Image (cartoon, rainbow, N blue to C red):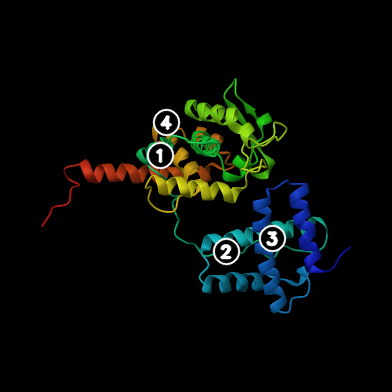
């Protein structure tokens, strides 16, 4: 059995990759968070994972808070540490989980950025001039139509697309699979891209979205292309692919009021995660009230 703390960290990451089948992006976050905690242990003279105690974990969280790290970021790191110690307990490397009762300081709940319906329409009304732009429009339409995460989009293969039934089989966080519909306009954009895809990629390439060299498109390339489209259409702020997912959820909830359906379509394991979109909906209602209700209007001096 290895005793080196770094080797146990690597074994845990291998477990996450092979047994829990977490995405490369999630693994990157686990590695970064746990490496920082390991650096704290080394600086504090804590030689083994079994030597870390609850008091020291609280000191780590307090130090991170003093450095200006948000409560949400600290909570994510503590969650990673709890998961790591659950694995170490299973492997009988440690006798307790020192992060079990440690909680991060509360921070203000940040609502996700969304685009309004008019901005979405402006973004998706463009006309493609070549195969790359046809691909971009298919990406934008599909993310807004089906509420995909960026990682889900770039991992999508043609074998998971049912054009006849207009459905996608998506593998989300924790290797959980869900089936989501494809909207009419997204379907048209996807078919237009498929007809021109041969200019960029070989037919044997399974990825739905490929780059100019015929290989699977990466997440960073999608981010860059979306920013380019947003600038061209004069959209405000720094638009991120997740903005389209948030907009999908907010607009769908606003129209349907069906929180459970939105939860299923987004692939959220816990409905409390989905409930943040009810706050967005309330903000919209509050703005309408402030603008329209006679007793809400501010008196101009």
Asked whether residue 275 appears in the rendered view, the answer is: no
Q: Are marks 3 and 4 in contact (CB under 8 Å)?
A: no
**Viewport quadrant of the C terminus:** bottom left
Query: Where does label 3 land, which residue?
Result: 31
Q: Residues within 10 Å of mark 4 (few under 14, many from 20)?
A: few
Mark closer to the chain start, 3 or 4: 3
Name the image quarter holding residue 50: bottom right
Mark closer to the chain start, 3 or 2: 3
The residue that appears at 72% across and 59% down in the rendered structure is 84
Helix, strand or loop for disc 1:
helix
Q: Residues within 10 Å of mark 1 (few under 14, many from 20)?
A: some
Along the viewing direction, whichever of 47 and 35 lies nearer the viewer: 35
Query: Where does label 1 land, which residue?
Result: 120
Task: State the separation of the CA atoms marked 3 and 1.
Answer: 36 Å
Which is closer to the viewer, label 3 or label 4?
Answer: 3
Query: Where does label 2 land, which residue?
Result: 74
Side (left or right) of 177 relative to 96: left
Which is closer to the viewer, label 1 or label 2?
Answer: 1
Helix, strand or loop for disc 2:
helix
Mark closer to the chain start, 1 or 2: 2
Helix, strand or loop for disc 3:
helix
Residue 85 location (% of width, % of height): 73, 60
Residue 277 location (% of width, % of height): 44, 43
Residue at the extreme top: 164
The residue that appears at 61% across and 33% down in the rendered structure is 197
Q: Are marks 2 and 4 in contact (CB under 8 Å)?
A: no
Mark closer to the chain start, 2 or 4: 2
Side (left or right) of 108 relative to 159: left
Task: State the separation of the CA atoms marked 1 and 4.
Answer: 18 Å
Which is closer to the viewer, label 3 or label 2?
Answer: 3
């Amino acid at each position: 059995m290895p005793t080196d703390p770094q080797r146990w960290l690597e074994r845990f990451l291998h477990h996450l990759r092979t047994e829990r089948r977490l995405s490369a992006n999630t693994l990157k976050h686990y590695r970064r968070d746990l490496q920082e905690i390991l650096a704290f242990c080394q600086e504090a003279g804590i030689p083994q994972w079994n030597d870390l105690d609850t008091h020291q974990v609280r000191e780590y969280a307090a130090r991170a808070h003093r450095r200006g790290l948000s409560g949400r970021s600290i909570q994510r790191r503590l969650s990673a540490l709890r998961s790591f110690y659950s694995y170490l307990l299973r492997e009988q490397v440690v006798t307790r989980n020192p992060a079990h009762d440690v909680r991060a300081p509360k921070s203000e709940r940040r609502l996700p950025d969304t685009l309004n319906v008019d901005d979405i329409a402006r973004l998706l009304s463009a006309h493609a001039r070549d195969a790359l732009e046809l691909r971009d429009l298919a990406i934008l339409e599909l993310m807004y139509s089906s509420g995909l995460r960026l990682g889900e989009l770039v991992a999508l293969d043609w074998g998971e697309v049912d054009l006849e039934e207009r459905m996608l089989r998506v593998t989300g966080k924790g290797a959980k699979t869900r089936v989501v519909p494809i909207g009419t306009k997204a379907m048209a954009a996807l078919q237009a891209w498929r007809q021109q895809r041969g200019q960029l990629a070989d037919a044997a390439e399974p990825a739905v979205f490929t780059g100019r060299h015929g290989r699977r498109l990466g997440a960073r390339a999608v981010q860059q292309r979306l920013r380019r489209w947003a600038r061209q259409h004069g959209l405000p702020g720094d638009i991120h692919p997740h903005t389209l997912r948030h907009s999908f959820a907010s607009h769908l909830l606003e129209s349907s009021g069906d929180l459970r359906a939105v939860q299923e379509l987004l692939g959220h394991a816990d409905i409390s995660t989905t409930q943040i979109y009810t706050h967005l909906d309330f903000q919209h209602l509050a703005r309408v009230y402030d603008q329209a209700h006679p007793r809400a209007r501010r008196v101009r001096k």
